[in-house]
């Protein structure tokens, strides 16, 4: 089985849902709670995974806690 995201025009939604009902033996329709709370959930998940991978592979420069706070204090001149 494969999972797809489908965008349906408002005027076609009733026809589309009827099509799904007629083919319910081959199609399973699920609500995705992640998308209900955040329509960009999967896009954000992909971006965070990329950031994590770059961090692990040393493509991204990481600073220590002390360096970060030193930069903040320097910027605010505290």
Image (cartoon, rainbow, N blue to C red):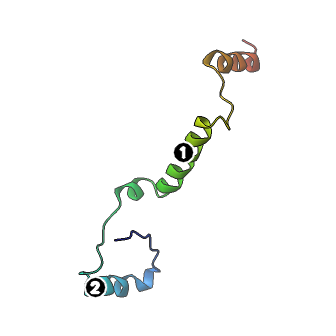
Q: Which residue is mark 1?
A: 48
Neighbours of disc 2 within 10 Å: few (<14), some (14-19), many (20+): few
**How far across and down, in percent of the image, does residue 64 sit?**
63, 20
Disc 1 to disc 2, C-alpha distance: 36 Å
State which tag comes first along the sequence, 1 or 2.
2
Q: Residue at x 26, y 83 (%)?
A: 21
Asked whether 68 or 36 is in front, the reply is 68
In this picture, is 60 found above or below 12? above
Q: Residue at x 37, y 84 (%)?
A: 16
Which disc is residue 23 wearing? 2
In this picture, is 15 found above or below 78? below
The local secondary structure at tag 1 comes to: helix
Asked whether 12 or 46 is in front, the reply is 46
Q: Residue at x 66, y 21 (%)?
A: 68
Position of 36 with respect to 30 (left or right) is: right
- Which quarter of the picture shows residue 51? top right
Q: Residue at x 66, y 24 (%)?
A: 63
**How far across and down, in percent of the image, does residue 71 sit?**
72, 20
**How far across and down, in percent of the image, does residue 5 sit?**
44, 69
On-image quarter of the C terminus: top right
Asked whether 47 or 1 is in front, the reply is 1
């Amino acid at each position: 089985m494969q999972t797809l995201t489908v965008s349906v025009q408002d005027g076609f939604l009733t026809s589309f849902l009827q099509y799904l009902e007629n083919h319910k033996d081959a199609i399973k329709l699920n609500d995705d709670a992640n998308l209900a709370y955040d329509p960009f959930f999967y896009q954000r998940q992909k971006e965070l995974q990329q950031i994590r991978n770059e961090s692990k592979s040393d493509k991204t420069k990481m600073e220590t806690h002390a360096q970060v706070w030193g930069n903040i204090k320097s910027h605010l001149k505290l």
